[in-house]
Every structure is written in C-alpha cells, then in structure tokens.
Image (spheres, grey):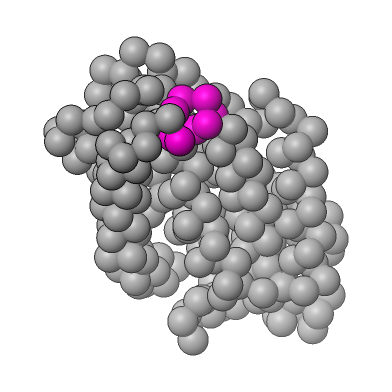
C-alpha cells in the first residue's frame, strides 16, 4: 500500500499545486475587477453548492475503488452494505476535513475576522446524506474512477476556496494569498488521496491490491 499511496501523492501533487495557485490568482483578479460578484454571501452560496457535489464524487470514487477490486477478488460478489459503509464514511468524513475543517484552521491562522467552521453534515444533513448515498448508488451499479476522481479534486478545491472566501469580504494581501494557496493545497492533496486511495484499500487484503489505481 505504501508504494501505491506515494505514487498517487506524487502524481497528484503538481496538478493540485497548480490548481491552488491558479484558483487564488483568479479570485484575486475577480475581486479586484468585480468585488460585488464574489462577496461573502455569494461565496457562502457557492460553498453550499460545491460541497454536496464534492461529497457525491468522493462517494463515487471511494465506493468504486472498493467495489472494483474487492468484487474482482470475490468473483463479483461484493456486499452492498460494505460498499455503502465505506463510501459513506470515506466521503462525508474526509470531505468535511477537506472542505470545512482545514480551511477553517487556515482562516484562524491567517487571522480572518469572520471565520466559522461550516460543517456541511451538521448544517445541511439531508442534502449531504442524499449526496453521499447518490454517489454510492451510482458507484455500485457503474463503478468508474477516472473522471470522477478528477472532478473530485476540482470540486474539493472549489469548496475549500469558497469556505475561505466567505470568511473575508475584501481583497487579500500577497501574504494572505500565499497562505490561502498553501491551505488549499493541503486541504485537497492529502484528503482527496486519503479518500480515494488509502481508505478503500484498508478494507482490501494486501494480495488483492492493484498495481496502480487511476493510471493503469
């Protein structure tokens, strides 16, 4: 498992870093040119839109990886309850860490005045639970990982960024922008790989581990 995890982290690192830097640069430019377009209220609405979508794709990928490799080892006999449990906890738990908690810790360290940990599963439980179950159901019948994983990374970055933007209405200084990019990178790189790779593999015996996940 260690070699698989290190390979996936190396593969996703540059893409995630470029995405974080590009996202922050785009937001800085947009807030300079049209500050009314991306104020705190708009950022809050966008967070409440992207966070459930992130949960959907996270559940799809986590459940799909477990279903693909465990089902292959068991001649396509994978228990539905196991797929549901792994997809549910792997998506909601890690999406909360990625979209809500790590951005909140970044806001605290950067000294943003209106920071608050907006926990999706607490503040909109029906939407988040439905999102997780929808993603799991889709994965059970059509277990795909390539496109959903890419979308998972992009949506995780968007949700994390909008969580930060809702904490500060004005423009960011250069140091704040660097700090935001760093926390975006951490919030997406480690949790997304944790959700998509490490978590489902915990429940697969070592001899069933694939040589590669998204790139074979």
Q: Is residue 43 magenta?
A: yes
- In the rendered view, does 9 fall on the left or right side of 82? left
Choose between 34 and 215: the one closer to the eye: 34
Q: Residue at x 28, y 60 (%)?
A: 18
Image location (x, y in percent) of residue 20:
32, 51
Image location (x, y in percent) of residue 100:
49, 32
The furthest residue to the left: 175
Q: Residue at x 47, y 47 (%)?
A: 158
- In the rendered view, does 104 fall on the left or right side of 56? left
Choose between 121 and 31: the one closer to the eye: 31
- In the rendered view, does 58 fall on the left or right side of 216? right
211 in relation to 9, above or below = below
Q: Is residue 100 magenta?
A: no
Image location (x, y in percent) of residue 90:
61, 49
Q: Quadrant of residue 143?
A: bottom right
The number of numbered discs placed on residues in the rendered structure image is 0
The residue segment tinted magenta is 37-44
The furthest residue to the bottom: 216
Q: Residue at x 49, y 86 (%)?
A: 216
């Amino acid at each position: 498992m260690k070699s698989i995890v290190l390979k996936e982290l190396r593969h996703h690192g540059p893409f995630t870093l470029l995405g974080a830097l590009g996202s922050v640069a785009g937001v800085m430019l947009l807030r300079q040119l049209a500050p009314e377009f991306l104020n705190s209220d708009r950022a809050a609405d966008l967070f409440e839109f992207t966070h459930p979508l992130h949960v959907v794709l996270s559940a799809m990928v986590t459940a799909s990886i477990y279903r693909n490799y465990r089902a292959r080892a068991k001649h396509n006999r994978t228990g539905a309850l196991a797929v549901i449990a792994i997809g549910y906890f792997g998506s909601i738990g890690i999406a909360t860490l990625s979209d809500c908690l790590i951005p909140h810790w970044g806001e605290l360290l950067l000294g943003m005045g209106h920071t608050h940990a907006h926990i999706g599963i607490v503040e909109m439980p029906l939407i988040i639970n439905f999102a997780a179950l929808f993603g799991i159901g889709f994965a059970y019948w059509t277990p795909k990982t390539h496109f959903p994983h890419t979308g998972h990374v992009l949506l995780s970055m968007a949700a994390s960024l909008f969580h930060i933007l809702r904490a500060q209405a004005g423009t960011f200084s250069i140091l704040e922008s660097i700090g935001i990019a760093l926390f975006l990178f951490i919030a997406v790189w480690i949790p997304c790989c944790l959700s998509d790779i490490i978590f489902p593999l915990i429940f697969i015996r070592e001899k069933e581990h694939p040589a590669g996940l998204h790139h074979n």
